Image: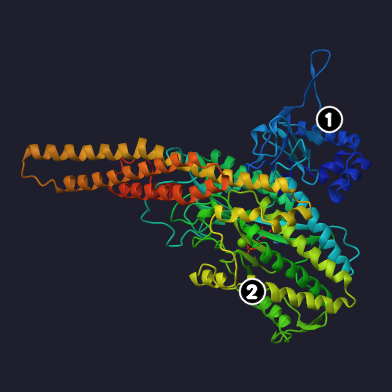
């Protein structure tokens, strides 16, 4: 196989393959399930399973797996072979409808946040027919949702699917009010841009911190970092180019629309963007993309780092979640239209989003919270931890004119009527891209930029879908009661702008002045994971999720527990890794170098007492002082960790790690980094930042 068109989707059981291989009526029934969520009967599933198996075997597969996304944030799979014994002592290859529809992996080893009682360790995986099955490493992978015996979601996919149903329901109600009768379903779409670092495998293997934690816990600043800005969109090195080509091919085979690739701001940093697709599929594809990025890197003797902050002082990695809402008739509801009706409809969806972001700032912040991402948000490289909306000058002007009942000065632009209001016809915003906004309107979609590079995009989209669904519900409730639709619409838009304009901010999000201004506006500034997590279980947020049937109250509490637990576990591993590196590698290396210096000085003095040994002697004094001070920091971190044993409450423990353990870690790091600058290179136990960041030639 050679051409890209032939390669694309060659490992995917997609519509084309289904049409080719399934009996006509089976295909029709399956399509009905995929498009309209109709239940698939077991006898139909049996036919699909058999066709899937035959297709997979032809492609060299011997096993199948239910592929799912537990709350670890990575994907899980348990492989079963297709073989089934015959009476004659041979085997045949079998795959039943039941095996396709449902699996029963042991759930006890996955995080459940207390949902799974110990006596019932069984979990269920249920086929998600809206995401195509695919072949990976000789295994037929069936995308599935994962839940407990009692039906509680234990994964990232189930709530995402529920949230898509929620926004579908409410968006349809609004569209009907605008007289849209032909639309039968509404879906959100996502195109996630993924950032990553590529470094040489040999260098990686010498760094315990990268191996255990995915980020460097020590490392003095290299002479050259990203200050020259010579990497961004720079020419791609041949080795990286070969990697990107292989990666594209691997992704294309899996039906993933990998489209754009380029170098990012930091040395060794790159980005991949796919063409957008339905959110649920985009989430699956993003998980697969991350997996493939790491796999293909190994083949090229490199390691792909997906951590949000692999290197101190160098830009970290994020994900830009480009999000929009589309109808099954192919209309992007965030595309300003040509007619007054279309524009009014656009404005109502826009208002729903503005209101949603304002009222659920806390949940949006929580949806991107992790120990890793805490390093980015708030540092001047990623959007700040304050959630705000960028609309651009033109759209903001339009909203202001509606709010104040003034005519929008659109210069020479044609005016159109929206509702009872005279408004300009508006076009894609021509204002400059604002790169500092956490939530930016970019013409026909919003770009949510706070996501960390390693996390699943599901959480963020669950919040976006559900929060917007809630605002659409409120709007539909108001509008369907109205006697005069147009004036009710106009009032609603006006009121929404008035009440929620505080969330709109078109300026520089990195500016300190914004922090003060945001505080004045009453916006939240939740800097860290322990700061934001308590908001997750507030009555307002529980009401949101339960009323739209996205989470039960028990599910919310379980996720709250898991997030806090995860935060603590990550920091604990990092702290222990630092201690091990400090005690067993760094301090002994400094001692060895000191010994060399003192021996050299003695040898020199033996030749003649008059020989100048100031280099060895002075350095020895400085090294010894610095090592002693580092040793104090080691003891301080040891003590900080020892005190965690007395804290039982999950939130209290997370706060303690944030306030005390992180401080002790930072202290130890500065002491060690200082020593790195004084210690001879051949004594230092680890490759330097320079060695790592410029390891790909
Ligand atoms: P940028 O200037 O930010 O690079 P692009 O037009 O290249 O903008 O799009 C960036 C990402 O947004 C791509 O992944 C693209 O597929 C995605 N995108 C474009 N339109 C939509 C949409 N309607 N819904 C969701 N994502 C979209
Ligand atoms: Mg972008």
Q: With respect to residue 359, does 645 lie above or below?
A: above
The crowd level at tag 1 (other Cα within 10 Å; few <14, some 14-19, many 20+) is some
Residue found 55% across the figure and 73% down from its top: 517
Q: Circle 2 — which element?
A: loop
Q: Is residue 45 left or right of residue 383?
A: right
Residue contact between numbered discs 1 and 2, judged by CB atoms under 8 Å: no
Residue found 70% across the figure and 74% down from its top: 499
Residue 203 at least partly seen: no
x and y, in percent, of residue 364 in the image: 64, 58
Mark 2 = which residue?
A: 392
Q: With respect to residue 675, does 225 lie above or below?
A: below
In depth, the one of 54 and 518 nearer the eye is: 518
In depth, the one of 596 and 16 nearer the eye is: 596
x and y, in percent, of residue 215 in the image: 48, 46
Which quadrant of the picture is home to ligand 2? Answer: bottom right
Mark 1 = which residue?
A: 96
Residue found 68% across the figure and 72% down from its top: 500
The crowd level at tag 2 (other Cα within 10 Å; few <14, some 14-19, many 20+) is many
x and y, in percent, of residue 239 in the image: 51, 47
Q: With respect to residue 650, does 405 lie above or below?
A: below
Residue 540 at least partly seen: yes
Q: Is residue 398 left or right of residue 40?
A: left
Colour scheme of this structure image? rainbow
The picture quadrant where one finds residue 64 is top right
**Mark 2 or mark 1, which is nearer the start of the sequence?**
1
Q: Circle 1 — which element?
A: loop
């Amino acid at each position: 196989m050679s051409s890209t068109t032939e390669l694309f989707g060659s490992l995917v059981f997609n519509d084309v393959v289904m049409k080719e291989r399934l009996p006509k009526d089976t295909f029709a029934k399956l399509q009905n399930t995929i498009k309209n969520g109709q239940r698939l009967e077991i006898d139909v599933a049996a036919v699909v399973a058999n066709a899937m198996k035959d297709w997979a075997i032809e492609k060299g597969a011997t096993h199948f797996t239910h592929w799912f996304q537990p709350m670890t944030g990575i994907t899980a799979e348990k492989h079963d072979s297709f073989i089934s014994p015959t009476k004659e002592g041979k085997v045949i290859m079998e795959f039943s409808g039941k095996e396709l529809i449902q699996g029963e992996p042991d759930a006890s080893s996955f995080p459940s946040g207390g949902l799974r009682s110990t006596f019932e360790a069984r979990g269920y995986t249920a086929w998600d027919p809206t995401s195509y099955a695919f072949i990976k490493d000789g295994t037929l992978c069936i995308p599935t949702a994962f839940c407990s015996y009692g039906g509680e979601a234990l994964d990232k996919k189930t709530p995402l699917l529920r949230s898509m149903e929620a926004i579908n329901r409410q968006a349809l109600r609004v569209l009907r009010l605008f007289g849209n009768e032909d639309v039968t379903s509404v879906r959100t779409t996502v195109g996630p841009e993924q950032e990553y670092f590529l470094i040489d495998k040999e260098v990686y293997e010498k760094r315990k911190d990268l191996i255990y934690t995915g980020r460097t816990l020590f490392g003095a600043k290299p002479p050259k970092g990203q200050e020259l800005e010579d990497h961004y969109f720079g020419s791609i090195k041949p080795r990286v180019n070969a990697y990107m080509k292989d990666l594209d091919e691997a992704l294309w085979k899996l039906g993933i629309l990998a489209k754009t690739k380029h170098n990012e701001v930091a040395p060794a940093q790159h980005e991949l963007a796919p063409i957008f697709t339905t959110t649920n599929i985009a989430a699956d594809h993003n998980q697969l993309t991350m997996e493939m990025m790491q796999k293909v890197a190994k083949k090229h003797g490199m390691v792909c780092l997906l951590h949000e902050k692999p290197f101190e002082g160098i830009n970290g990695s994020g994900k830009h979640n480009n999000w929009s809402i589309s109808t099954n008739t192919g209309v992007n509801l965030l595309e300003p239209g040509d007619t007054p009706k279309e524009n009014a409809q656009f404005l109502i969806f826009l208002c729903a989003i503005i209101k949603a972001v304002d009222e659920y700032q806390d949940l949006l912040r929580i949806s991107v919270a992790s120990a890793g991402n805490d390093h980015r948000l708030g540092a001047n490289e990623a959007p700040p931890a304050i959630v705000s909306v960028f609309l651009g000058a033109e759209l903001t002007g339009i909203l202001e004119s509606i709010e104040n009942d003034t005519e929008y000065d659109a210069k020479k632009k044609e005016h159109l009527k929206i509702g009872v209001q005279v408004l300009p016809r508006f076009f894609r915003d021509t204002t400059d891209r604002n790169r500092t906004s956490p939530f930016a309107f970019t013409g026909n979609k919003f770009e949510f930029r706070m996501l960390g590079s390693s996390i699943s995009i599901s959480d963020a989209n669950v919040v976006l879908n559900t929060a917007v669904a809630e605002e659409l519900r409120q709007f539909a409730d108001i509008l369907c009661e109205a006697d005069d639709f147009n004036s009710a619409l106009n009032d609603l838009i006006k009121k929404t702008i008035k009440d929620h304009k505080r969330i709109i901010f078109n300026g520089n999000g990195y500016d300190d002045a914004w922090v003060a201004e945001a505080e004045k506006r009453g916006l939240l500034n939740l800097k860290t994971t322990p700061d934001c997590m308590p908001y997750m279980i507030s009555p307002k947020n529980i009401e949101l999720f339960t009323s739209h049937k996205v989470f039960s109250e028990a599910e919310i509490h379980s996720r709250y527990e898991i997030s806090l637990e995860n935060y603590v576990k990550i920091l604990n591993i990092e702290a222990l890794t630092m201690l091990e590196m400090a005690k067993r590698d760094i301090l002994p290396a400094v001692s060895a170098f000191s010994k060399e210096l003192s021996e050299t000085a003695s040898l020199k003095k033996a030749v003649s007492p008059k020989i100048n040994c100031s280099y060895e002697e002075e350095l020895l004094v400085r090294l010894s002082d610095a090592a002693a001070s580092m040793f104090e920091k080691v003891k301080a971190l040891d003590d900080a960790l020892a005190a965690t044993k007395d804290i039982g409450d999950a939130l209290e423990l997370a706060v303690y790690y944030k306030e005390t353990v992180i401080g002790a870690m930072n202290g130890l790091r500065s002491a060690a980094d200082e020593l790195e600058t004084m210690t001879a290179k051949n004594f230092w136990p680890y490759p330097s930042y320079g060695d790592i960041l410029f390891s790909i030639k």
